[in-house]
Image (tube, rainbow, N blue to C red):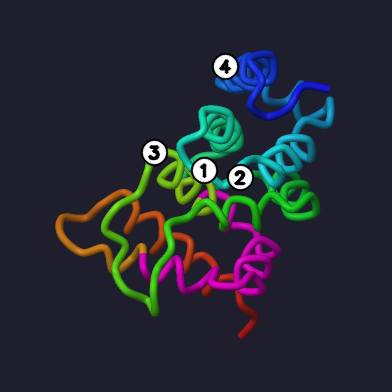
């Protein structure tokens, strides 16, 4: 079995990412059970945020939705049930006591974008609020300051969608 650092695994992750860029292929990948597998691979990947395999996995997940309309509930549900939400949260930059996040890798930014798209589904917000430091990391992203950054926008979008999905 190829490990996450092997060239074969990296090539496979890149191929799936490339296929996921097309809507018709996303449907085929989803029907084939790719979402839980992506979540499991992401959860077992190294904690190094710059690892190419981790980056490819996050980008593939991001391809299943967009920031405007979010992700389909089926995709969000499958990711949540497979540990994908917690794996994405672990990739976010750490925020000490809600301090602003000043630096984020491309993988961390992609994870923030994926969470913003996923958070249109209430179950995702439940996973984020139940995760250690989930809210704290999002607040740190929002407080990034300076010109509006993608990281701050994605953190704010995630928090706003979570708040909107809460029962009155």
Residue name at image x 68 percent, y 16 percent = 12
Image mark for residue 164: none
Camera-near label (3 vs 2) is 3
Q: Quadrant of residue 148?
A: bottom left
Q: Are marks 4 and 1 in contact (CB under 8 Å)?
A: no
Camera-near label (4 vs 3) is 3
SS under mark 3: helix
| Mark 1 or 3, nearer chain start | 1
| Mark 3 or 2, nearer chain start | 2
Q: Are marks 2 and 4 in contact (CB under 8 Å)?
A: no
Give me the C-alpha separation between circle 4 and circle 3.
Answer: 17 Å
SS under mark 1: loop
Q: Position of residue 30 (x, y in %)?
A: 76, 30
SS under mark 4: helix
Task: Judge left or right: residue 24 versus residue 22.
Answer: right
Q: Quadrant of the C terminus?
A: bottom right
Camera-near label (1 vs 3) is 1
Of residue 102 and residue 26, the one placed in the foreground of this image is 102
Residue topped by disc 3: 106
Residue topped by disc 1: 48
| Mark 2 or 4, nearer chain start | 4
Give me the C-alpha separation between circle 4 and circle 1.
Answer: 22 Å
Residue name at image x 40 percent, y 68 percent = 95
| Above-or-below relation of 81 to 18 | below
Residue topped by disc 4: 18
Q: Main secondary structure of the magenta part?
A: helix
């Amino acid at each position: 079995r190829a490990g996450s650092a092997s060239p074969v695994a990296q090539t496979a992750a890149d191929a799936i990412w490339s296929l996921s860029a097309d809507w018709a292929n996303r449907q085929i990948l989803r029907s084939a059970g790719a979402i839980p597998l992506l979540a499991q691979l992401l959860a077992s990947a190294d904690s190094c945020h710059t690892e190419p395999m981790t980056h490819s996995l996050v980008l593939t997940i991001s391809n299943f939705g967009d920031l405007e309309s979010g992700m389909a509930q089926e995709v969000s549900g499958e990711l949540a049930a497979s540990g994908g939400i917690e794996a994405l949260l672990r990739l976010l930059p750490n925020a000490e006591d809600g301090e602003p996040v000043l630096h984020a890798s491309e993988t961390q930014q992609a994870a923030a974008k994926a969470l913003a798209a996923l958070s249109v589904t209430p179950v995702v917000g439940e996973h984020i609020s139940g995760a250690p430091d989930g809210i704290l990391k999002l607040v740190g992203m929002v407080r990034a300051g300076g010109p509006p950054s993608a990281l701050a926008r994605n953190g704010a979008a995630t928090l706003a969608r979570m708040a909107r999905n809460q029962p009155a």
